[in-house]
Amino acid sequence: QVQLVESGGGLLQAGGSLRLSCAASGIIFSIHAMGWYRQAPGKQRELVAAITSGGTTNYADSVKGRFTISRDNAKNTVYLQMNSLKPEDTGVYYCKADRIVRGVTLYDYWGQGTQVTVSS
């Protein structure tokens, strides 16, 4: 059974920092691309940051320079370090695992999400 379990969300003031974690089980973690998405109230879910199985990262323009995604294959965990948080970063943050082969996503898995609320 595949599980992606997010943790680390919370309520904090603007300018603060949080580190989200996503622990994976039931998959061969190292061969999956991992991503963090967020969904704000009334908005569509959007990609925040992603990291390939090889460690290449990409970020939404809105978080570049403030957020860092990383992975620890030995711990089957992906992290999202969030600094200089803004109220517009508020939302539910979801972890996603993608199995991508030759540019094609064969399947994916989602976590249940963790709430991040940034007050002004």
Image (spheres, rainbow, N blue to C red):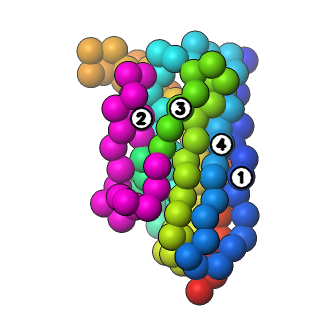
Which secondary structure, mark 2?
Answer: strand
Q: Quadrant of residue 62?
A: bottom left
Q: What is the crowding at mark 1: few (fewer than 14 residues within 10 Å), some, or many (at least 20)?
A: some
Q: What is the crowding at mark 4: few (fewer than 14 residues within 10 Å), some, or many (at least 20)?
A: many
Quarter that holds the C terminus: bottom right
Which residue is denoted by mark 4 in the rendering?
21
Give how far apart the Cα atoms at labels 2 and 1 are: 19 Å
Asked whether disc 2 touches disc 3, contact meaning CB atoms under 8 Å apart, the reply is: yes
Give how far apart the Cα atoms at labels 4 and 3 are: 9 Å
Q: Nearer the viewer, residue 39 or 9?
A: 9
Q: Is residue 116 left or right of residue 56?
A: right
Magenta residue span: 50-68
Three-letter residue code for mark 3: Arg
Which secondary structure, mark 4?
Answer: strand
Based on the picture, tell me whether residue 25 belongs to the magenta stretch: no
Labels 1 and 4: the sequence-earlier one? 1
Labels 3 and 1: the sequence-earlier one? 1
Asked whether disc 1 touches disc 4, contact meaning CB atoms under 8 Å apart, the reply is: yes
Based on the picture, tell me whether residue 52 belongs to the magenta stretch: yes
Labels 2 and 4: the sequence-earlier one? 4
Q: Which mark is drawn over residue 8?
A: 1
Q: Is residue 44 left or right of residue 73?
A: left
Three-letter residue code for mark 4: Ser
Labels 4 and 3: the sequence-earlier one? 4
Labels 2 and 1: the sequence-earlier one? 1
Q: Which mark is drawn over residue 51?
A: 2
- The residue sitting at 48% across, 33% down in the picture is 34
* Above or below for 62 versus 34: below
Asked whether disc 2 touches disc 4, contact meaning CB atoms under 8 Å apart, the reply is: no
- The residue sitting at 58% across, 27% down in the picture is 72
Labels 2 and 3: the sequence-earlier one? 2
Which residue is denoted by mark 3 in the rendering?
71
